[in-house]
Image (cartoon, rainbow, N blue to C red):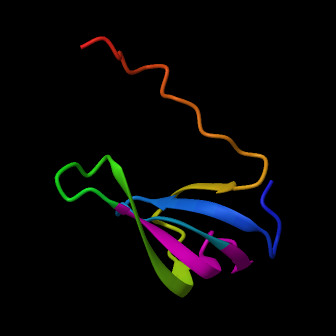
Amino acid sequence: MWYMYSKGYVKDQLGLRASGILKGYDPLLNLVLDNTVEYLRDPDDAYKLTDDRRNLGLVVCRGTAVVVICPTEGMESIPNPFISHDT
């Protein structure tokens, strides 16, 4: 569960992947994030993130475009079990 004024991660349909502090939301899942950092994608591969970051500050994420929201504390990244690594 993602609580107000705690840090979380957001992904939307347009490809934005960002983390920030949840400052507010409404019933349509429009999110207000503060101290937002965007994770930039590789220009050659839209599915791959680079190590580059961009500070966005205060951001409103449109609820109809939000795909994933999750807290960053208590979360760990795991490798995709559905991708075959044998090439």
Return the residue found at the far left.
Answer: 44
Asked whether 50 or 70 is in front, the reply is 50
Residue 72 lies, in percent from the top left, at 70, 56
Magenta stretch contains residue 31: yes
**Direction from residue 54 to residue 44 in the image, left or right:** left
Which residue is most to the top? 86
Q: Quadrant of the C terminus?
A: top left
- Quarter of the rendering containing residue 42: bottom left
Query: In the rendered image of this protein, does residue 23 appear above or below residue 86?
Result: below
Residue 66, compared with residue 36, is above or below; it is above
**Above or below: residue 24 compared with residue 48:** below
Q: In the current view of this chain or complex, which residue is farthest to the bottom?
A: 58
Say above or below: 84 vs 46.
above
Q: Residue furthest front?
A: 51
Q: Residue at x 50, y 75 (%)?
A: 62
Is residue 8 a member of the stretch shown in magenta?
no
Q: Residue at 49% across / 81% down in the picture? A: 55
Front position in the image: 63 or 79:
79
**Residue 82 occupies quadrant:** top left
Residue drawn 53% across the image and 73% down it: 37
Q: Which residues are magenta?
A: 21-40
Q: How many marks?
A: 0
Q: Position of residue 45 (x, y in %)?
A: 22, 48
Nearest the eye: 43 or 33: 43
